[in-house]
Image (tube, helix red, strand yellow):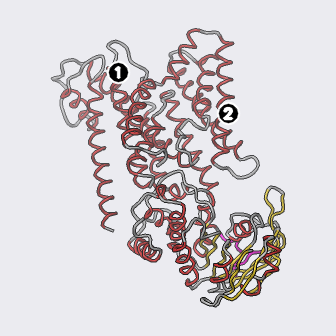
Amino acid sequence: MNRIDKQRQLFYMSLLLFTVLIILSVGIGVTVGQVAVPLTESFQILTKNLSGGLIGDLSNLSSGAYENIIWQIRFPRVLLAMLTGMGLSLAGAVMQTTVQNPLADPYILGISSGASLGATFAIMIGFGGTSLLAQLGLSFWAFLGAVTAAFLVLLLSNVGGQVNSIKLVLSGMVLNALFTAFSNFIIYIANDAEGIRSVTFWMMGSLAGASWSTLPLTATVVLICFLFFLTQERILNIMLLGDEAAISLGVNLSFYRKLYLVIASILTGIIVANTGMIGFVGLIIPHMIRGIVGSNHRYFLPLSVFSGSLFMVWSDILSRIILPTVELPIGILTSLIGAPLFIYIFVKKGYEFGG
Amino acid sequence: MNLTVENVSVSIASQQIIQDISLHVSQNQFVGLIGPNGCGKSTLLKSVSKILEPDRGIIMLDDDNVQELSNKQLAKKMGVVGQFNQVNFDFSVRQMLLLGRSPHKGLMERDNAVDHEIVEKVIRQMDLGKLADRSFLSLSGGEKQRVILGRTLVQQPKFLVLDEPTNHLDIKHQLSILKTVSALPIGVLAALHDLNLASRFTDYLYAMKDGRIIKEGTPEEVLTEAVIKELYEVDCRTYTNPILGKQTIEFL
């Protein structure tokens, strides 16, 4: 009993530590960028706006443009980074459990190629451009593509009996190939240089589109999904034991598998619609946390979500400062940081995959 | 609890695996299933534990039709140890055992002191003390098998279904598991490979071949030279073991 209490204590302390780190990182995240805003002034602006104008006084700012930069551009962006990290890690963790495969990631069920097809379609067939309506159209099509792909995968893996993990992975791969072919076909026949650039940019991921208008929806979806999966800890644990063992413990997995995949797909779809494709986060963060705390979802799920969030905030910060004049697409950076980090853990901890 | 299987037939992928099987297990009885590989023992056990659905026939656990019980209701009554327990992800042994409490838990209900106490009791009963804090994936096949049986006991079932429970086990643990199981005050249906162990521990035996029951009775009635020849196509001699007083088989 004592041992378990100790474990629990350690868990809550880590959560607290992560929370503090995330808050600090958000603070740092809003100050860095092309225009350097002093840290104290950034915090003044944040406290003023967060408290609804009650606390703080902005009359002593060195430049009036700062408030705009911090509050309208950077803060929504850092928040989007947080939510993206949370959402992708959560979706990744759940997908790995649902298909009982440690190699699964949020994009495994053809979600990425579905979203790409939607986005390519929108850009190449005429929803492209820079107007707000066009941007919204792009997100909408990407979301539609992602969710359609996930439903098709579920449908396909349901043919000829119960959904199982191998059928899911195979269906995902097949539809992935099909959607990629469609996307490439559209790009090839459209022959539109500007469009190709937009598609490429979208596929590398970006948080630059963050704005107060889209954040509430994203935040709501991510948080509801997080809370939902927290309540499912027991079934998620049982899911790792396989179908037969699960039945003998009173749980029929095929229903829950579908339910979880649909929810995780919608979650991924919402994020992809906002940010484009940001790879690797959903794969490595759950892996790393699993390697450290084991597979008990009670600890594993919250820690993945918190560390994913921290990881994305820092990836975003680096993507803005690593090159002196331009911003690096964040999808490149997550893989650039993620891969070595993963190798380090892999070598250092003698980590067995899935272990 | 009493288990009654009546005229059950099961097919997998339109191939008939077992045909017209009837058997009965009473409260407190240890009933064994013997037969060659592929004779349908596992299929029968899977249909009893609601993993497979029979084409025909009925399976009753006391007054409940197993097919009509929800998975959770069934899991509160029946514990199952399957033959394959492949896991890709890791748990500590204690965590694995705790999962056995799941059928008794509501959706949001956490494991409480009573659950931990039950787990500790099973750890002592099953001699798992040395393994309790290790990771499940690091265990040997036999150790895993013991943990899975332990998890099933944590479930506190009123009926137990075992598919080759002594697979991978060394002599000490073969004996201790069968002793533990046969001392449980519940009905047990187990597929067994080792005929001498079956003779020693079971109260009643069913012999299966090609999806049918060809002989049933006490171990002395079933484990005869003729039946064993028919089942396994090997010659043997049987005699009453002077030490244990049990029917014993010597293969030729």
Residue at 47% x, 74% y: name it.
B126
Q: Which mark is residue A320?
A: 1
- The N terminus of chain A sits in image quarter: bottom left
- Looking at the image, residue B119 sits to the left or right of residue A64; the answer is right
Residue B206 locus on image (x, y percent): 75, 79
In the image, farthest residue toward the left: A60
Q: Mark 2 or mark 1: name the one nearer the start of the chain.
A: 2
For the point 61% across and 32% down, which residue is it?
A144
Which residue has dot 2 on it? A175
Q: Is residue B184 magenta?
A: no
Q: Is residue A88 above or below residue A316?
A: below
The answer to which image quadrant residue B196 occupies is bottom right
* Picture residue at 48% right of the left edge, 29% below the top: A278
Part of the protein shown in magenta: B58-69
- Residue A111 place in picture, x, y as percent: 59, 34
Question: Image height check: is B91 above or below B130?
Answer: above
Q: Is residue A39 above or below residue B77?
A: above
Element carrying mark 1: helix
* Neighbour tally class for label 1: few under 14, some 14-19, many 20 plus, Cα within 10 Å: many
The chain under label 1 reads A
Instruction: Tell me if A81 is positioned left or right of B27 in this view.
Output: left
Tell me: A303 left or right of B51.
Answer: left
**Three-letter code for the amino acid on which mark 1 is drawn:** Arg
Question: Is residue B65 part of the magenta span, yes or no?
Answer: yes
Q: Is residue B212 visible?
A: yes
Amino acid, disc 2: Leu
